[in-house]
Image (spheres, rainbow, N blue to C red):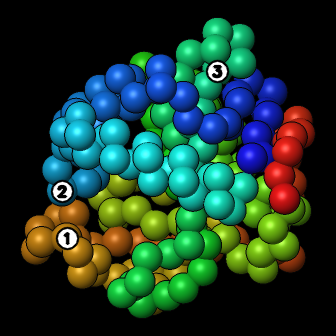
């Protein structure tokens, strides 16, 4: 399985010790502000099981993110094929961090690493990112890593009930527009 290393972060496979802080993150209403619900511990455990399986099968997916200096788990970042039923296809980059990790540039650093990996190791022609129209912090990360938005691509998520979280924005970065930065290296892979 591939690990990604940046100046300050390691994106790696999931450990048992990650489950409790991951569940705490997903139970935090502020972390889940742009999702319909918080998650139970069981739902968080099930998501880790899915992430592990996908990483083992593909060698890439949703990695656990830790701070290199401390070894502390701070969230996740990665790449995943777009869910069926959305008005576009491709591979999506994403990230979610615990509140204490906000404001340190970690989301941007992790996002750059997964986008670099997508283009350089997977040979993707485009990487996408999706968030709610109200999630201005994630949209700022998307712009910082070079992604652009065409409002004509905005859409209503069919899996989200009517309300402020239903409207989503789509950001794109094409391989020819990508400027690799931020990753120290990766290990493993297929």
Foreground residue among 121 and 49: 49
Q: Which residue is mark 1?
A: 160
Instruction: State the SS at label 1.
Output: loop
Q: Residue at x 81, y 68 (%)?
A: 122
Q: Which residue occupies 56% across, 72% down?
A: 81
Residue position for label 3: 67
What residue appears at the point 10 percent right and 74 percent down from the top-left corner? 162
Q: Is residue 162 visible?
A: yes
Q: Residues within 10 Å of mark 2 (few under 14, many from 20)?
A: some
Horizontally, residue 70 falls left or right of residue 162, namely right
Q: Residues within 10 Å of mark 3 (few under 14, many from 20)?
A: some
Q: Secondary structure at mark 3?
A: strand
Give the alpha-carbon distance from disc 2 to disc 3, as whole Å: 28 Å
Marks 2 and 1, Cα distance to the nearest angstrom?
7 Å
Q: Which mark is residue 28?
A: none
Q: Position of residue 27 (x, y in %)?
A: 22, 33
Q: Which residue is denoted by mark 2 in the rendering? A: 36
Tell me how far mark 1 sits from mark 3, CA to CA: 33 Å
Comparing 169 with 25, the one in front is: 25
Q: Residues within 10 Å of mark 1 (few under 14, many from 20)?
A: few
Q: Secondary structure at mark 2?
A: loop
- Kindly give the residue lying farthest to the top in the view shown: 70
Q: Position of residue 9 (x, y in %)?
A: 70, 28
Q: Earlier in the sequence, mark 2 or mark 3?
A: 2
Q: Are marks 2 and 1 in contact (CB under 8 Å)?
A: yes
Residue 110, by quadrant, is top right
């Amino acid at each position: 399985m591939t690990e990604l290393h940046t100046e300050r972060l390691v994106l790696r496979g999931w450990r048992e010790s990650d489950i409790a802080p991951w569940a705490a993150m997903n139970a935090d209403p502020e972390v889940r502000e742009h999702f319909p619900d918080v998650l139970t511990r069981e739902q968080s455990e099930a998501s880790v099981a899915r992430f592990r399986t996908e990483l083992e099968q593909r060698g890439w997916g949703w990695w656990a993110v830790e701070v290199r200096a401390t070894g502390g788990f701070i969230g996740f970042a990665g790449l995943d094929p777009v869910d069926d039923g959305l008005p576009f296809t491709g591979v999506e980059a994403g990230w979610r961090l615990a509140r204490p990790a906000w404001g340190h540039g970690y989301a941007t650093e992790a996002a750059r690493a997964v986008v670099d990996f997508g283009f350089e190791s997977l040979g993707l022609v485009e990487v996408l990112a999706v968030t709610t129209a109200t999630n201005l912090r994630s949209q700022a990360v998307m712009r910082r890593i070079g992604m652009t938005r065409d409002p004509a691509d905005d859409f209503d998520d069919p899996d989200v009930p009517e309300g402020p979280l239903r409207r989503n924005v789509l950001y794109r970065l094409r391989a020819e527009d990508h400027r690799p930065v931020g990753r120290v290296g990766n290990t493993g892979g297929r």
